[in-house]
Image: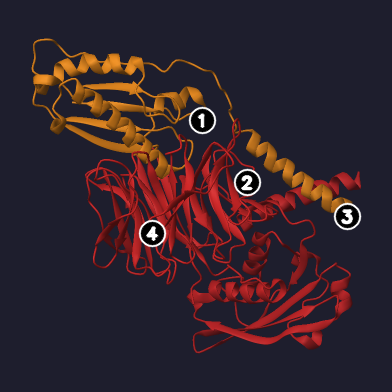
Chain colours: A red, B orange
Amino acid sequence: MRYILFVLLSLLALGVSAQMNNVIVTQTVQNPTKIAIVPFGWSGGRLPEDIPSIMRNDFRFSGQFEPISPDRMLAFPTAEVAVHYRDWKVLGAEYLLIGSITQEAGRYYATYSLFDVIQQKTVLSQLRVDGTESQLRDIAHRISDKVYETITGIRGIFSTKLIYVEAYARPQNYKLMLSDIDGARQQLLHSSRYPILSPIWSPKTGQRVAYVSFEANNKPAVYVMDIATKRRQQLTSFKGLNGAPSWSPDEQKLAMVLSKDGNPEIYVMNVLTRQLERITNHFAIDSEPTWSADGAALFFTSDRGGKPQIYQVTLATKQQERVTFDGDYNARSRVSPDGKSLVVLNKRPGGNYHIAAQDLKTGNLRILSETNLDESPSIAPNGAMLMYATRSGGKGVLAAVSLDARVKILQPPKQGDVREPAWSPFFN
Amino acid sequence: MITKAIKHGLTLAVVMSFLVGCSGANTTKEQPPVETTTPEQTTSVEETAPLTSVVYFDFDQYALTAESRAVLLAHSDKLKGASVAVRLEGHADERGSREYNMALGEKRANAVRDFLVTQGVSGSSLEVVSFGEEQPAATGHEESSWSQNRRVEVKY
């Protein structure tokens, strides 16, 4: 009886916490690392942001960590002298993160330390991050990034951001939105009653976003927006398709699809001079270009073989070759930051549309997502996870999966149908 | 250990029931409807409300079916002499990637345009636009809706 009660209460607690923390982690790694993030010391009144809570959410989102709830904590040390490892061993914690916040002349200073509970040693001692009141969330994410990288050796993505499209029906409306990667601080970049699609961050500075909008006479055109000022520029107005923009790694060029010469083909445009270079010349559909990590080649979708598959074109020679062979549909490719994997929208005969990753060396393709009607993968700048769009509960929602498929996440629904996620680069 | 497994299992169960609730996989293979609206015989085309006709396509195809050709033949007679602007709006169903579906919609509209041109309609009066999967006619997530969305709308 007590067992059932415990289970019911756990379920309730989980339900509530899933709500507050915003994402449903449907699959974690096999033994997530237990981390205790203790409430920070703070002498003032109520802080507008709960920094440890934001950090616990960050670590949950990684799917590799299991934050210990403050309800279970036996002590709340805010300084190293107050740390007794047995209080944390008893909870099964592997890492302990403590800290305190002070305020001076309108600026907030967070000091934190990280301890290895198993080895009983200090890993990070009295590191400091500071910021204004509006940067309290950034302070939290900065600490999460540092702790995550210290423990895993992988750069954290908790300070990155997301751009996505939210679509409404009756009346029809499209919003280009920006938010933190944890879903907070949602901001409207642009609203239109005409379709908006294919947003993509400038990969080096993250200062601009290119996207496609139908607002010019209900016809598609490529736009570039400066994210800080929201000032936008229409870059194309060719007859026919203007779509699938993709920034070169140095942000100087945009690859795109245009059908002005009679057929959907890949072109590269110099963003400054607007000079166009035609890349493909084939009567089939050629679309969705994406740059290789070194900027020397483009991957693109083509149905020249009868069904959509990914091809690669070396820009210097225009030599083209087919890249994907597994499945009867491969489209919308993206290259991982280390250049080793190609993430695609894949379908095998008789199967569903899933996000998959192909090893560019071996050609081996592995399905990553388990949801249905998946599309639009966007890879995190640390290459560990990707965000994509899918459907759940009758709505378009975002989901995430790690590139080793061990972590699976479903985002909660928003008011409209959410789609077309674009993961930002790192902001230096 | 066991309680943790139960916790995870229950979370999974909650999420699964959530997801199962929405999957409506109903794959009835119906013939897509072929609609034609015929205007009054005597009035000039410009005086009536915008006329629409819709032709449908097979999955991931932009070739015209025999039915589509028959529908378009009827239209080409009306359009041959008249100097009206005709909009050919191409569409695709929601499956697959958005930009590829934009191109698919355009290829479909191009196929309609090319056919009308071979029937003697002036190419300059035919405007092609693709909306990809952005403007579905039916919003369900199974073949009965998808087949209605793989279409070109002829508007004049």
Query: Mark 4 falls on what kind of element?
Result: loop
Query: Mark 3 falls on what kind of element?
Result: loop
| Chain for numbered disc 1 | B
Which residue is the site of mark 4?
A317
On the image, which quarter does residue B98 sit in?
top left
Which label belongs to residue A369? Answer: 2
| 4 vs 1, front mark | 4
**Amino acid type, label 2:** Ser
Which residue is the site of mark 3?
B1
**Amino acid type, label 1:** His
Q: From the image, which quarter does the N terminus of chain A lie in?
A: top right
| Chain for numbered disc 3 | B
> How many other residues sit within 10 Å of disc 2, few (<14), some (14-19) or many (≥20)?
many
Q: Residue A69's spot in the image, x, y percent?
A: 75, 64
| 2 vs 1, front mark | 2
Please tell me if label 3 and label 4 are on a single chain. no
> Marks 2 and 4, how far apart in space?
35 Å
